[in-house]
């Protein structure tokens, strides 16, 4: 199942949501691709989704839950990857 929180996270003049899967990263990547989210939007265990794609994500089947629930779901599924446990990713070529 796919979940996201409401767009409430400001960055670069926009509001963002977090999109997760409680099944696998493969499910998450496939859904994000269907949504049109670029792979660079993936951050350790979630995708950052701009507010203008929120409605489309819900229409495609993502369930809206509070932010704390996202973390609980990731932990329960064994998919949580906290920042302090993940090595930094190399810069994306432009």
Image (cartoon, helix red, strand yellow):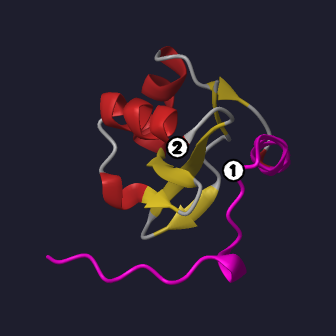
- Are the residues flagged by discs 1 and 2 in contact, CB closer than 8 Å? yes
Q: Looking at the image, is 62 positioned above or below residue 26?
A: above
The image position of residue 41, as x and y in percent, is 40, 57
Disc 1 is placed on an element classified as: loop
Could you give the CA–CA distance between mark 1 and mark 2, rounded to whole angstroms? 8 Å
Quick one: 1 or 9, which is closer to the camera? 1
Q: Is 71 one of the magenta-colored residues?
A: yes
Quadrant where the image shows the N terminus: top right
Q: Which of these two is toward me, 85 or 83?
A: 85
Give the residue drawn at x 26%, y 76%.
92
Q: Is residue 36 left or right of residue 93?
A: right
Label at residue 79: 1
Q: Is residue 2 above or below residue 52?
A: above
Q: Residue at x 42, y 70 (%)?
A: 12
Residue 18 percent coordinates (x, y) = 59, 49
Residue 33 on image: x %, y %: 32, 36
Q: Is the residue marked by circle 2 packed among few (<14), some (14-19), or many (20+) residues within 10 Å? A: some
Q: Which residue is mark 2?
A: 25
Magenta range:
68-94
Q: Position of residue 74 (x, y in %)?
A: 75, 46
């Amino acid at each position: 199942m796919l979940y996201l929180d409401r767009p409430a996270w400001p960055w670069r003049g926009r509001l963002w949501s977090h999109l997760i899967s409680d099944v696998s990263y493969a499910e998450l990547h496939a859904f994000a691709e269907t949504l049109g989210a670029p792979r660079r939007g993936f951050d350790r265990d979630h995708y950052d989704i701009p507010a203008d794609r929120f409605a489309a994500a819900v229409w495609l089947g993502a369930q809206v839950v509070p932010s704390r629930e996202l973390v609980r779901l990731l932990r329960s599924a064994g998919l949580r990857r906290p920042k302090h446990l993940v090595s930094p990713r190399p810069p994306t070529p432009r």
